DNA sequence: AGACAAACCTGTCTGC
DNA sequence: TGCAGACAGGTTTGTC
């Protein structure tokens, strides 16, 4: 579900939670990513603090409080972070719930059927010491990614461009949908070796990454099946994708038939005719 | 180093 | 209708 535009959409729609005090914390006890359980004792340390803001780096969200800790959340494939009225029934596979103060009681709920997501508590100011956050490269939206950055990062790399764009230590936030979209937009072949990327292509790719993300944000993110914002709204960007999940359909640029291939075990969509450089 | 496959899970869809 | 198999937005781990 969630690549950068979806996580950013969740971040923005969590704004109504800012200023609320956390009145309780609950977790199902189920393991999430790598069977790691949300740390129950640390979640309790958030109780009594007030939410002061929500940050994002790549696909990770950080919910800041006026206490010493922040909540770290990653959606994996099917994770949802939503605000609900406390009286609403909990969705299946709800694994973490925070009670929030306010005129009418609300809850911040994390649900994740596949349990590929992550929930953790980090000390504010020490975010980079968290292994997941410390490994991230510059953010694809806010990190000043440009042709120079991509050209420099791609030198000496034997990996394919598809793998390069998905590498979170190079660019944080790109996922499988937008990797295909950006490579198509920049007319870069997904199987091209990164070390062979030209300077002009690096610039085109940086521009394409920004364009693809901006377009998706304008459309509220891409909902293929699971993604919803914190207010429950689905994204409309699936209707505007150029190549992802469009095998057999005409390329929007040259009308050739879009193809699907599997690279590193993951689907890649591309145009075999105009995406050959 | 680095490239690749497998593993972690559940839900949904397809084809027989 | 039922069942097996493939597949899904991500990340980590192990193997070559």
Image: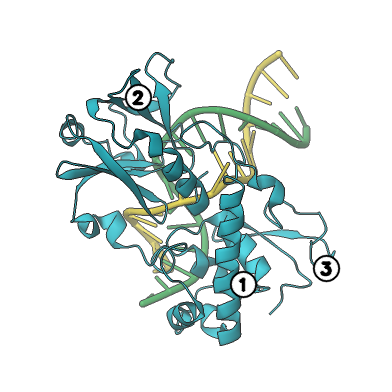
Chain colours: A cyan, B green, C yellow
Instruction: Identify the residue position indicated by label 1 in the image.
Output: A191
Secondary structure type for disc 3: loop
Closer to the camera, A271 or A46? A46
Q: Quadrant of residue A248?
A: bottom right
Instruction: Identify the residue position indicated by label 2 in the image.
Output: A107
Say whether disc 1 or disc 3 marks the residue closer to the N-terminus.
Answer: 1
Estimate how packed mark 1 is, as few (under 14), some (14 to 19) or many (20 or more) residues with alpha carbons within 10 Å: some
Q: How many marks?
A: 3
Instruction: Identify the residue position indicated by label 3 in the image.
Output: A254
Residue in the picture at 20% in, 58% down: A129
Regarding residue A266, the answer to whether it shows in the image is no
Q: In screen coordinates, is A131 left or right of A147?
A: left
Q: Chain of mark 3?
A: A
Q: CA distance from mark 1 to mark 2?
A: 45 Å
Task: Please give the label number shown on residue A70.
Answer: none
Residue in the picture at 60% in, 80% down: A201
Q: CA distance from mark 1 to mark 3?
A: 20 Å
Q: Residue furthest right?
A: A255
Q: Quadrant of residue B7?
A: top left
Nearer the observer: mark 1 or 2; the answer is 2
Relative vertical location of residue A57 with respect to residue A157 in this rendering, above or below: above
Closer to the camera, A54 or B14? A54
Across and down, in percent, residue A226 comes to 55, 36
Across and down, in percent, residue A147 comes to 51, 79
Work out whether disc 1 and disc 2 sit on a shared chain.
yes
Work out whether disc 3 and disc 2 sit on a shared chain.
yes
Across and down, in percent, residue A174 comes to 50, 59
Q: Chain of mark 2?
A: A
């Amino acid at each position: 579900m969630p690549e950068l535009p979806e996580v950013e959409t969740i971040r923005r729609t969590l704004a109504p939670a800012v200023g609320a005090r956390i009145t309780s914390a609950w977790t199902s006890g189920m393991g999430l990513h790598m069977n790691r359980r949300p740390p129950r004792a640390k979640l309790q340390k958030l109780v009594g603090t007030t939410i002061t803001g929500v940050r994002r780096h790549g696909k990770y969200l950080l919910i800041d409080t006026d206490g010493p800790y922040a909540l770290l959340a990653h959606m994996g494939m099917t994770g949802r972070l939503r605000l609900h009225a406390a009286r609403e029934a909990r969705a299946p596979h709800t694994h973490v719930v925070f009670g929030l103060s306010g005129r009418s009681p609300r809850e911040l709920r994390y649900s994740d059927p596949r349990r590929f997501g992550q929930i953790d508590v980090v000390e504010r100011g020490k975010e980079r010491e968290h292994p997941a956050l410390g490994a991230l490269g510059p953010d694809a939206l806010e990190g000043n990614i440009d042709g120079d950055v991509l050209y420099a990062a791609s030198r000496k790399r034997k990996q394919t461009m598809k793998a390069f764009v998905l590498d979170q230590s190079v660019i944080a936030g790109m996922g499988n949908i937008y990797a295909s979209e950006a490579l198509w937009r920049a007319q870069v072949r997904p199987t091209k070796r990164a070390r062979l990327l030209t300077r002009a292509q690096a610039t085109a790719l940086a521009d394409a990454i920004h364009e693809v993300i901006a377009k998706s944000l304008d459309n509220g993110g891409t909902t293929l099946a699971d993604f919803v914002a914190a207010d429950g709204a689905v994204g409309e960007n699936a209707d505007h994708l150029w190549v992802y999940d469009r095998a057999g359909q005409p390329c929007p640029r040259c009308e050739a038939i879009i193809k699907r291939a599997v690279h590193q075990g993951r689907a890649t969509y591309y145009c075999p005719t105009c995406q050959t450089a």
